[in-house]
Amino acid sequence: MRSNNAVLSLLGWTFLPNLLSSWLQRIYYGITIRAGTPHPIPGSPKYNLHRRRIHILVVSLYLLYTIYEADHSIRVEGNYYTDLSLPFSATEKEIRSRMRRLAAQHHPDKTASGSSGSGSQYDSHTYFIMLQRASETLSDYPRRFAYERFGPEIHSWVADGTGRKFTTVRDYMKQGLYLKMPHYVVTAGVLYVMGLFNYLSFARWWRWALLGCVCMAELWLLTRRNIPWVLTDVVNPFLATLSNLGSFFFAFTNQAATQGSGTSHPPYLPFQLIELLRKISLTSYIALNQLGPLLRPSNNPAHMPEEKEGEALEQGLDRLDRAVAAMNAEAGRLVDMEMAPFANDPEALKGMKGRVKDWLVQNTVRSDPMVKDAVGNEIRKRRVDAPFGARGTR
């Protein structure tokens, strides 16, 4: 399922921003340009400038949406503390007491009598098994420590068929780091290889810095003895505030907050925050690829702001004027050089000017279309009236 979501997200990043940019640009022109006034021509500097700004806006909004989607999926999955409605600081006694109360409500023997179908019995049985696993995991300190940092996948480590036993925190940490850290090695290798082929050239060092920060944050979250205070005192309250603002907004607009979104953001465990950070880093890499060509300075007038287009045009005209002046000066110098032998001979210079004048007149007359047409008609008439074999008929 996660691989399918990744493929869909990649396809969305590839096609959706371009489609939305074209659609929004048409709407923008329909609103800002009066009827009858021509729209900017596709490919013109003004059209490209508007397209660039709209595309940056679309990609930025889509980046925020993917982060919200990742946060929402993590909230929907939940964790053992939210399933049991317990705080992070719950003791083993509080966990067992809470489990006894939940067992009295959700035990299959208690719910079977009130159920009318096998489907509801199956759901209640599955839910009770999940509660029992949550209680057993949180009641055992090594498993609780590992669950808070690596998530529910620790149960698959015990049942992987290798016969290994995980009884201490050290055992879980060794296995978790063995499985988690290769992700960064592979990512670093991909970045290095693509850099050798001149891919991902924009913000290359920022990509490496982002990868290093996420790796260091994950190591810090995994190796703390207790849940870091930054997570409990800063990150979780901040997310709860954002969630409350979002719930208030939806409730004010279309009553969407009543559809199971809740009134507060459930607290994150370290493994949930690590998952969110990885998704944010992947989304940031894709966003850099999308925004890089748009934010990179370019000499192309299509990528320049409107206020700089006039300056670029004036500079181009000035360069053209200087080039024309230089060509005129060079042509005059060459003419003077060719006329140098006649400079001290007025009679020869006068005759040269006369011959040049006659040559110009004759060439002008001969190249005139009307003269050419008249001469051609006269020659055609002569050839028609001449007998066979006469000169000029061939």
Image: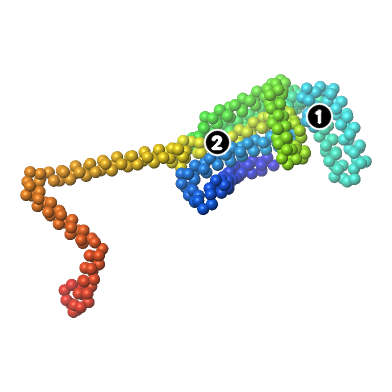
Residue 60: which quarter of the image? top right
Residue named by callout 2? 288
Q: Position of residue 269 (x, y in %)?
A: 72, 28
Residue 25 visible in the displayed image: no
Q: Report whether 292 appears left or right of 96.
A: left
User: Horizontal and vertical percent for residue 27?
Assistant: 58, 47
Quarter containing the N terminus: top right
Residue at left offset 16%, top offset 43%? 336
| Percent x, y of residue 188 | 56, 31
Sort mark 2 into few (<14), some (14-19) or many (20+) by Cα contacts within 10 Å: some
Farthest-out residue, right: 113
**Percent x, y for residue 368?**
24, 61
- The Cα atoms of the two marked residues, 2 and 1, are separated by 40 Å
Q: How is the image coloured?
A: rainbow
Q: At 18% from the left edge and 56% from the top edge, which residue is drawn?
A: 360
Mark 2 or mark 1, which has the lower sequence index? Answer: 1
Residue type highlighted by circle 1: Ser
Give the residue drawn at x 65%, y 35%.
67
Identify the image quadrant of residue 110: top right
- Taking the image as drawn, is residue 13 in sight? yes
The residue identified by callout 1 is 85
Q: Secondary structure at mark 2?
A: helix
What's the amino acid at mark 2?
Leu
**Nearest the camera: 159 or 31?**
31
Q: Is residue 191 shown above or below 32?
A: above
